[in-house]
Image: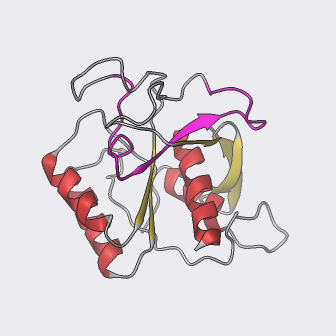
Amino acid sequence: PQDDSGHGTHVAGIIASENNNIGTVGIAYNTKIMCLKAGNSSGHFLISDIIKAINYAVLNGASIINMSFGSNTSTLALQECLADAYNSCLLVAAAGNEGGCVEWENDDHSPGKAYPAAYPYVVGVMSVNSKGDYLSGFSNYDDKPYNNTEYEIYAPGENVYSTFPNNKYMSMSGTSMAAPIVSAIAALLR
């Protein structure tokens, strides 16, 4: 798929950019990745396209699905699709960049609640600085462990250097950069 904004290329590079002494190297550079595009050229996602991409990944043997996207609205269709995918895949998602707490409100529209990361069967990834000593100011977070809407892990998400379209490299920040770090480590473990 063609990358309209560079976001997908950057995420993919964090996981699996080639170890060729140029630019950077992915954490799991020997891993095969399945690049799927669910967002349109303006960066918006339709739930139906996300579901198609997840179903395609599952049917074609993906063992880990990285989801560096999110919404503060939960849908039953996406929830059911991911619950089915959970039977055969590790699901990893970005916690979101609103700087909010997942528990601030009890409804599905909390400024800190990002789906799919907030589902209990998805590993929700928050962002920390490169040293891991503080939460990134933009990162959504979780302050009540072991409840139904849970972000499980932190990973570096500030100024992460990776691939970009047209043979370029750049640094980007966000939980979208932290999530593929976790996905890549999971790939190494698998």
Figure quadrant of residue 49: bottom left
> Magenta stretch containing residue 97, yes or no?
no
Figure quadrant of residue 147: top left
Q: Nearer the viewer, residue 86 or 22?
A: 86
Q: Nearer the viewer, residue 140 or 83?
A: 83
Magenta span main SS: loop
Residue, x 15% and y 53% (percent of image)?
77
Residue, x 32% and y 41% (percent of image)?
115
Residue, x 39% and y 51% (percent of image)?
122
Residue, x 24% and y 21% (percent of image)?
106
Relative side of 57 to 130, left or right:
left
Name of the residue lying farthest toward the bottom: 60
Relative side of 173 to 36, left or right:
right
Query: Measured along the vertical axis of the image, is residue 140 above or below residue 78?
Result: above
Q: Nearer the viewer, residue 104 or 66?
A: 104
Is residue 75 at all visible to an observer of this figure? yes
Name of the residue lying farthest toward the right: 21
Spot occupied by residue 52 in the image (x, y as percentages of width and height): 23, 66
| Magenta stretch, residue numbers | 111-136
State the count of labels: 0
Q: Nearer the viewer, residue 156 or 121?
A: 121
Give the quarter of the figure containing the C terminus: bottom right
Relative side of 173 to 42, left or right:
right
Query: Measured along the vertical axis of the image, is residue 34 above or below residue 76?
Result: below
Is residue 174 at all visible to an observer of this figure? no
Relative side of 146 to 171, left or right:
left
Give the quarter of the figure containing the N terminus: bottom left
